[in-house]
Image (cartoon, rainbow, N blue to C red):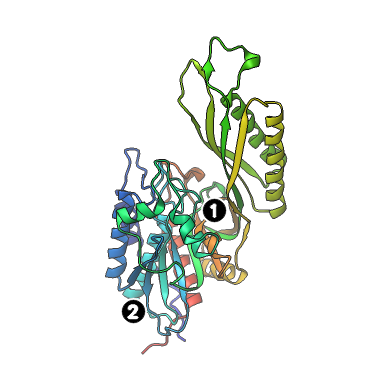
């Protein structure tokens, strides 16, 4: 084996140019990106990604859930590919970096190796996972979750968005209902680069976050059914107010997360009043909520305490019906120690300041860690803002993360002997 040049660096301007170019696909007036999964904008960026990977000498395949895999051959085809990448979809008001930084940095790693004439022992495979964000379809990270065996392909294909369109229908519409069975592309390990989506790295002036753990998540869909009636003529004791009931649930989510903290958070992210009117008592409310913790016992306690609170709310509001469904549960992630060490060693060899981290957000690497060694690399984002059009990161930090990704992947894949 030959040693990888310690000064090997990605082309910062090329990576930055790719970030700015793809940000125009679904770009918003405020400088963010709206590129919902399996939308027309998603199709366009997928086509861009496919062509860029093919131009880099990769073979691109697509599976039945639209997961994309760009394979760069290695010297030893018997070895499982080292995976790298992330996702291309965004939140409704997303930014330029969430997800796509990891995918474009992975592409830049391949371009850099091509420029340097470096062949790896194991193949490298850049992945774009379908519906990481979970904003159009639930659950989030459904492409990698099905790959990891958490859901069947049939279950995912049947999921519907708010307009009743199934995943299967949306895939066909954009032409990404691939021929390969989910799981056809194999990996020996997976590394994902991502912006932190939190404030710690920036606050501590650290360049790289070495991610050791990921938070567990419980997602709920809820529906409260009361009775619509006139706001002026219905006495207070006779009301069946779905929205007033919902307000108690919101406060319960906040209270429970605070009481079981500090390693706990809870959020109500969506609410819809059916047939809203200013002079009608709300008769039906649908909502989503979630809890997260990196500790399994705390996550369990969050779920149990919330279930008890909802039962209690229902008991003193017997004229209103509360239906609560767990639509997704993900236990906390503990990334592979050997891959974590590879990330840390690459970071320190390159001279970047760093710190160990827990990921507050869910990521595809968290799913993949269930079936293969995996880990993550974080870089700072301005003010910790993400899932927002104001999301921002510096060119220097993005390049630093890509350099750590490059050297981590080379350490895992091995560098082939010169011909």
| Residue visible at 61% across and 53% down in the picture | 215
Residue at numbered disc 2: 117
| Residue visible at 40% across and 43% down in the picture | 164
Q: Secondary structure at mark 1?
A: loop
At which x and y percent is residue 291? Answer: 62, 44
Left or right, residue 14 beside residue 213: left
Quarter assignment of residue 358: bottom right
- 246, 364: nearer the viewer: 246
Q: Secondary structure at mark 2?
A: loop
At which x and y percent is residue 281? Answer: 53, 19
At which x and y percent is residue 262? Answer: 69, 44
324 vs 359: above or below: above
Residue at numbered disc 1: 362
* Image quadrant containing the C terminus: bottom left
| Residue 237 in view | yes
- 325, 302: nearer the viewer: 325
Residue most extreme to the bottom? 419
**Residue count near mark 1 (Cα–Cα under 10 Å), binned few <14, some 14–19, many ≥20:** many
Left or right, residue 35 beside residue 334: left
**Residue count near mark 2 (Cα–Cα under 10 Å), binned few <14, some 14–19, many ≥20:** few
């Amino acid at each position: 084996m030959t040693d990888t040049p310690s000064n090997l660096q990605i082309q910062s301007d090329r990576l930055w140019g790719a970030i700015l170019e793809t940000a125009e696909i679904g770009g918003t007036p405020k400088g963010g990106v709206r590129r919902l999964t399996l939308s027309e904008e998603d199709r366009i960026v997928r086509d861009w990604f496919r062509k860029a990977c093919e131009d880099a000498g990769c073979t691109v395949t697509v599976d039945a859930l639209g997961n994309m895999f760009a394979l760069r051959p290695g010297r030893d085809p018997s070895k499982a590919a080292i995976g790298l990448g992330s996702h291309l979809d965004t939140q409704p008001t997303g930014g330029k970096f969430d997800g796509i930084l990891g995918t474009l940095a992975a592409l830049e790693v391949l371009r850099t190796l091509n420029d340097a004439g470096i062949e790896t022992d194991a193949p490298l495979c850049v992945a774009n996972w379908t519906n990481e964000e979970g904003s159009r379809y639930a659950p989030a990270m459904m492409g990698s979750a099905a790959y990891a065996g958490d859901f069947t392909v049939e279950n995912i294909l049947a999921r519907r968005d708010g307009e009743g369109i199934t995943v299967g229908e949306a895939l066909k519409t954009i032409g990404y209902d691939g021929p390969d069975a989910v799981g056809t592309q194999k990996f020996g390990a997976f590394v994902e680069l991502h912006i932190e989506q939190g404030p710690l790295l920036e606050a501590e002036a650290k360049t790289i976050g070495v991610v050791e753990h990921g938070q567990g998540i419980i997602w709920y869909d809820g529906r409260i059914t009361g009775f619509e009636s006139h706001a002026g003529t219905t006495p207070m004791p006779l009301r069946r107010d779905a929205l007033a009931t919902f307000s108690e649930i919101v406060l319960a989510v906040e209270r429970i997360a605070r009481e079981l903290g500090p390693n706990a958070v809870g959020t109500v992210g969506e609410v819809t009043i059916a047939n809203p009117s200013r002079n009608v008592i709300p008769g039906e409310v649908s909502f989503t909520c979630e809890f997260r913790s990196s500790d399994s016992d705390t996550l369990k306690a969050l779920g149990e305490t919330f279930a008890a609170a909802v039962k209690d709310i229902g008991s003193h509001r017997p004229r209103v019906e509360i239906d609560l469904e767990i639509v997704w549960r993900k236990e906390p992630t503990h990334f592979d120690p050997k891959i974590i060490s590879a990330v840390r060693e690459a970071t320190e060899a390159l001279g970047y300041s760093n710190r160990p981290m827990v990921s507050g957000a869910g990521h595809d690497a968290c799913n993949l860690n269930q079936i293969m060694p995996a880990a993550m690399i974080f870089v700072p984002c301005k003010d910790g803002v993400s899932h927002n059009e104001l999301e921002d990161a510096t060119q220097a930090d993005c390049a630093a993360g890509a350099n750590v990704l490059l050297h981590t992947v080379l350490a895992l894949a091995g560098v082939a002997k010169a011909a």
